[in-house]
Image (tube, helix red, strand yellow):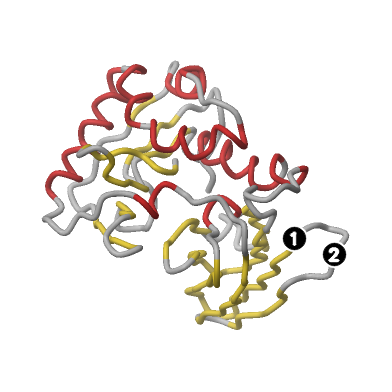
Amino acid sequence: MKSFLMCLALLASLTGFAAAASAGDPPNVAVNVIHSKSQGVIRINGVPVYRFVPTRDGGSATDSIGVGQWLIDGENSIAVETRSKDGGSTRVVIVKTIDEPHLFDGEIAGAGATEYKLQLKDVPRWGWLDAEQWTGDNQSLLAAVGALHAAFDKGDLETIMRQYKAFADDMAPYIGPISKDDFAEPLKGGTVQPLPADLTVESFYDHRLFVVRRADGSAPIRVDNEAVVKGIPALESGQFWIRKSGQWQIIRP
């Protein structure tokens, strides 16, 4: 399920990066997951960047995610892990452009995993690589999640924009600046769901990138707005964090 802001970032990965060809641009790589009666997660270098879920009617669906904003210099692991009901299946197709041969095309029958290794160079140095290490407890991070949730609940766009500074610094050269309107649209007439008490925290890249998730693997902050999108959250936030200048900040939506 894609949120409003996640769609913004993923659309940039799938389209905006395709025209870029100079050194230092994000790579144009997409992971397509064709799944039936299965659910799972896409991991880039271990980080759970996207989750897919079964369709309501039990039929087949295709989720396509641009992963350029997650790839780094050197060897990258692109992995898909699945859980499945009886008879479930998952096909994973990794591509650069529609005119080029697939980088990878594999099947997972039932529950399982598959992985593709991709070597890259001249990739942007993303913010988490130089973020502050944090080996303390999770309470300050969870407090930051709570403060961001409160800002969404109040419609405090100034605070939200400050929390998103690390993301803006990372992505503005490729997708342009984010604006208050990106948040105001789903919040207008929307409902901010309560923050769960059972959030989990994982760290990656030597305690520099942190992932906060609900028990089902989704983002902790959800905004429902049927006027924007029906059946799924209009906005999801609060999942990917770094520490910068002694403060917790969002590094990806």
**Are the residues tagged 2 and 1 within 8 Å (C-beta)?**
yes
Return the mark for residue 100. Answer: 2
Q: Residues within 10 Å of mark 2 (few under 14, many from 20)?
A: few
> Does residue 65 lie above or below 89 as drawn?
above
Q: Amino acid at mark 2?
A: Glu
Q: Amino acid at mark 1?
A: Lys
* Viewer-nearest residue: 239 or 75: 75
Q: Position of residue 122 (x, y in %)?
A: 62, 57
Q: Position of residue 58 (x, y in %)?
A: 60, 63
Q: Tell me if 151 is positioned left or right of 17 in this view.
A: left
Quadrant in the rendering for residue 134: bottom left
Q: Position of residue 239 (x, y in %)?
A: 36, 47
* Viewer-nearest residue: 19 or 211: 19
Task: Give the SS element for disc 2.
Answer: loop
Return the mark for residue 96. Answer: 1
Q: Position of residue 102 (x, y in %)?
A: 78, 70
